[in-house]
Amino acid sequence: MKIYEHPLYQEDIQNVSSLMLPWEKLQNSSLFISGATGLLGSFLVDVIMNKNFSEGLNCKIYALGRNENKAMARFAYCYHHPCFYFFTGDVNKPFKLPGVGKVGYVLHMASNTHPMAYVTDPIGTIMTNLYGLKNMMDFAVAHNAERFAFASSNEIYGENRGDVEKFDEKYCGYIDCNTMRAGYPESKRCGEALCQAYIKQVNLDVVILRLTRSYGATMLMSDTKAISQFLLKAIAGEDIVLKSQGTQYYSYTYVADAISGVLTILLKGKNGEAYNIADNASDIRLKDLAKLIANYCGRKVVFELPDEMEKSGYSTATKARLDSTKLQNLGWHSLYTIEEGIHRTIDILKD
């Protein structure tokens, strides 16, 4: 069964599609998305195409990626639809898309977002968050986009200084910039500064999406984030391997909630502002997350020391919970708890 055919996944798509948002802004408009085959990008494409099919939204999707075969397999249900266009290219190189005129909304969602990628491709990790972002913003300017959205990260906050329980959008914690692992959070920080430069210098309308540790059935099988590895182990019928004491306290976001947040910010956010996408119902310690997944699959949690390569890619933050009051003031609220999101992810991927 293809993921987009699964009843639970279809229910998730419908739940987001039914939200009270100003969808009319996308009527007869278009979205240009980098990272369209990724965890978040693919779900966003499915939501918009659902609106096209069911309500005649007529919102074109321009999807940029490096692997056409992967895109054809993932979006087989809409690949030849007149509202879907896939373009092969590397976001880190300047690009032009012949035949594409004005674009409504541009979203830069391509990024290395898991520990092993930070270790094996640290240069690519930084460049996608800087050169890739610049190329996408230049594209937005050239095509008179109404709004640009940059997918940033909770990692820009660095380590909790011990003075707050949750990070609001003004918080700034410590990052040791003279390490290989700093490439991801520092380039996201610099990317946000670049967004402000484009707002000031070329009058580009920009919103910043501060996503936290997202998960769901659209995750890549190569993803090495802890939650992804827990899920993959459980689905394979194996015990959950915890490579620390598990005391890290983080915010997590189910993919449907992450994309409902993205759409809320895209359609209702204020130019130049950053918004946290997170919810209390999905804040959990790593060891409790491992137990939650293990218990649902009838497995147990085992402890194992990470090797040096794995360890070098891990975040050093021990508490990173996000305050989403600012996003909630736009009318957003989560649809799923951590338990519901985990159960749905496992049930979909098992099938």
Image: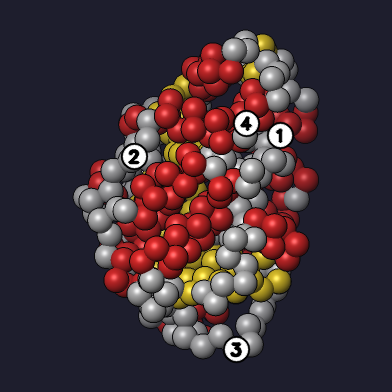
Q: Amino acid at mark 2?
A: Leu
Name the element at disc 1. helix
Is 255 or 3 nearer to us in this picture?
3
Residue at the (52%, 74%) spot, across then down: 83
Identify the residue under disc 1.
312
Name the element at disc 4. helix
Mark 2 vs 3, N-terminal side? 3
Residue 135 falls left or right of residue 197: right
Q: Amino acid at mark 4?
A: Lys
Identify the residue under disc 4.
350
Q: Amino acid at mark 1?
A: Ser
Q: Quadrant of residue 209?
A: bottom left
Is 182 or 253 nearer to us in this picture?
253
Question: In front: mark 3 or mark 1?
Answer: 3
Identify the residue under disc 3.
99
Label 3 packing within 10 angstroms: few (<14), some (14-19), many (20+): few
Gap in angstroms between the C-alphas marked 4 and 3: 41 Å
Identify the residue under disc 2.
335
Disc 4 + disc 1, Cβ < 8 Å: no
Q: Quadrant of the C terminus?
A: top right
Name the element at disc 3. loop
